[in-house]
Amino acid sequence: MSLRDVTVPRRRGRRREDSRLADHVDRLGEEHPPIPLGSVDYTMHNPELLAAEFGPVLAYMTRVELEVERNVLELNALLPDPPEVDRRFYADVWMPQETRHGQILDKLQQLIGVEPHVPNLSEVSFKLRFLGALGRARGVQDISRMLYYLTGLATERSAVLAYNKLHAGLLELGERAIAATVVAPIKRQEPGHFAYYQLAAQQLWDQLSGWQKWLTRELRKRSFEVVGAYNKRQVADFGDVMTALKMSAGGEPELRKYARQVGRAEHELMWAKSRGLKVPDYVFKALKRAAVAAADRRGEDWPAPEPTRS
């Protein structure tokens, strides 16, 4: 069999995969336009209680959603020559949807008197600029793209889990209007983003060489961060989010369950052949650092010691 016989089917396969991604982006744009501001009902029964229960969650989510403006600048620096389908996804579909999420949540946190977290809308780290410069070398930008997809998978999975918890918590408080017209429309849009990253990651992973896969794993282990946390204060803020949403109160067993949910997609993609590994350990360690940091800031231990029996 000639090299030409091998190359042509591979190229056709890649075109089919690119078409699947493009079709997915088209559907996302058509079926999930930015949420109309006029569709939101901010009627609340007890704003003070909502702020007390979920203020840290709303402040954190609002900042992360609004920071997509900077995220696109980061992607422009990280991926000097991205596939057109990636650019269409993050610039034409993802950013408008997420920005609208941030605007809606920002108004909600203002109405209930939550002190906002100031978003970083323009600062791109030297690390990302440097990695983008390296990306001009043959084979390196594919690794950067893979890290982008992996980050997207973990971010969107974290968002889905958090919005599901917040939605349930709002219903428990009786805040049905906020649950139905703020959180429910937002959480309906997040799985489509996850699906894009999943499709793109699987497609690219299958194309990477052995050294590229090895380096991707090593970089991922060293660079994983909880979603939206870029400094120590934000790591502790994320710990407060997990506390408010009851994701970490049960100590390490509960946190490992959450870590498995966040890291499942990249485990199945990159680590499934590792015996006994149910979740990438770096995911659990990052979540634990956030839980411990939040408890330390409150002057508490994590996990809280069990009450002594008399």
Image (cartoon, helix red, strand yellow):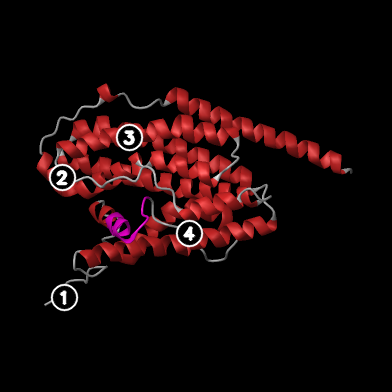
How far apart are the two marked residues, 1 and 2, measured between alpha carbons? 32 Å
**Residue type for callout 2:** Ala
Queried whether the magenta region covers residue 90, the answer comes back as: no
Disc 1 is placed on an element classified as loop
Q: Mark 1, mark 2: which one is toward the viewer?
A: 2
Residue that lies at the very extreme toward the right in this rendered image: 1
Q: Mark 3, mark 1: which one is toward the viewer?
A: 3
> Residue 255 placed where, x, y %?
35, 60
Which residue corresponds to mark 3? 101
The magenta-colored residue range is 228-239
Which residue corresponds to mark 1? 308
How far apart are the two marked residues, 3 and 1, measured between alpha carbons? 45 Å
Disc 3 is placed on an element classified as helix
How far apart are the two marked residues, 3 and 2, measured between alpha carbons? 18 Å
**Residue type for callout 3:** His
> Residue 199 placed where, x, y %?
56, 40
Which residue corresponds to mark 4? 223
Which residue corresponds to mark 2? 51
How far apart are the two marked residues, 4 and 3, measured between alpha carbons? 27 Å
